Image (spheres, rainbow, N blue to C red):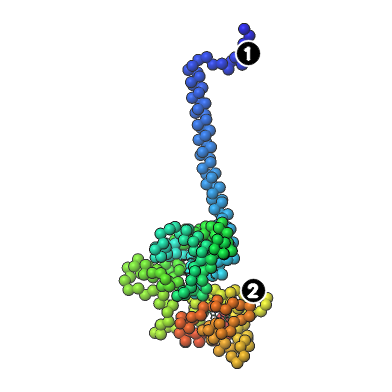
Amino acid sequence: MHKPLYHYLYIKSPIAKIAIGILALVVTLAVLGGIIVTEVPRMEAQTANWNGRSIEKGAALFASNCAPCHGDHGQGTMNVAPALNSKYWFTHRLDDLGYTGSQKSYVLLTVAAGRPSKVNSQWAQRMATWSRNYGGPLRDDQIDALANYILNWQESAVEQTDEEDPWQPFDGVDTGWAGVRAAEAGITETVGISDTQTVSETAEPRAPEVLFVNMGCSGCHNLNEPQDENTPHLVGPNLGNLAEVAGTKVPGEDAETYVHTSIVAPNDFVNPGYLPNLMPQNFAEQMTPEEINALVTWLLDPNRPQ
Ligand code: HEC
Ligand code: HEC
């Protein structure tokens, strides 16, 4: 009988069959192994890329929605909003609150729902509700991106020294951070940073330029730009030409009286185009009368060093 052309492919020897079978298996496993070995880094790269994009999106959202209060690097603004880019915040904050979930879940919950009340709160404004689910402006994926952006500070924040930690000025507000740091340093009698925030009659008066930063004024006011329609302003009016305009705003009030009142009772006169209640209402409790007078003089000094 005539053999078909492919008769050479018939293998008679059982040993050869087994050998070829094993060889085929080994080759298949090797190929599979190769795919797995390259797939893992490929997936990791993919995930990193995806996280990177989410962090970028979060950074943009933070700059436009959160930075006015929390600072452009998350360093916080006195009287306005606490620091987030902070060693304390990443290492002790949740313990102090007794919150047992993850840092990310804490951010997601706070940002989504906000903080409902500002009763007994030292902050000028409450933290708003951001999630669409609760009537806010942001989608869930945007809030997730914000959380990824904030958490991406962790690695460098935990390396901060206590002096570098921007939480410091907020200390003693509702945390025991001063106590924690004192305990770690072996100090039993705590003299917290918080002491600088309450008015102490015996302490040295603080300099106006220090108060301007520590009281959060600089977070809302541009000190060196003049007030006119063309200069962009922050949350509050520019103070660059305050000496010229202060005496013209309220009939019967000279510049000193006007600026003094603007600080201790901001709502007595609300500048057109600005919101009332934004400026903290309790500066008279946070500074001594002497300090406030010096601040007024300093703000009105046309030769104030820039
Ligand atoms: C109007 C100012 C303001 C804006 C804008 C703002 N926050 Fe806040 N935020 C606050 C205040 C005030 C608190 C503290 C509230 C409290 O403890 O009662 C806070 C608290 C937080 C906390 C919790 C901090 C902690 O340790 O308890 C997170 C996280 C946070 N904000 C994230 C954000 C993000 C993200 C945005 C932007 C989408 C944002 N905030 C916008 C004022 C603001
Ligand atoms: C949370 C933001 C915020 C902080 C913090 C803040 N201010 Fe203001 N400030 C405002 C806003 C908003 C206005 C405009 C509304 C009004 O006229 O009351 C204003 C108005 C003023 C005015 C009147 C300016 C003008 O041209 O009429 C002065 C002066 C002033 N602030 C000084 C200060 C000083 C000093 C501090 C710190 C001790 C301070 N502010 C802290 C938001 C803030």
| 85 and 142: which is toward the camera | 142
Judged from the image, the secondary structure of the residue bearing numbered disc 2 is loop
Looking at the image, is mark 2 or mark 1 earlier in the sequence? 1
Q: CA distance from mark 2 to mark 1?
A: 90 Å
Q: Position of residue 279 (x, y in %)?
A: 54, 78
Q: Quadrant of residue 273?
A: bottom right
Judged from the image, the secondary structure of the residue bearing numbered disc 1 is loop
Residue lying at the far front of the rendered structure: 134
47 versus 181 height, above or below: above
Identity of the residue drawn at 54% across and 16% down:
11
| 256 and 126: which is toward the camera | 126
Is 188 left, or right, of 273 in this rendering? left
**Residue type indicated by callout 1:** Pro
Q: Position of residue 226 (x, y in %)?
A: 63, 79
24 versus 88 height, above or below: above
| 137 and 304: which is toward the camera | 137
Residue, disc 2? 232
The image quadrant where one finds the N terminus is: top right
Identity of the residue drawn at 51% across and 22% down:
20
The nearer-to-camera label among 2 and 1 is 1
Identity of the residue drawn at 49% across and 68% down:
115
Disc count in the image? Answer: 2
234 versus 158 height, above or below: below
The image quadrant where one finds the C terminus is: bottom right
Residue, disc 1? 4
Asked if disc 2 is less than 8 Å from ligand 2, the answer is no
| 29 and 2: which is toward the camera | 2
| Circle number at residue 241 | none
Residue lying at the far right of the rendered structure: 230
Packing grade of label 1 (10 A; few <14, some 14-19, many >=20) is: few
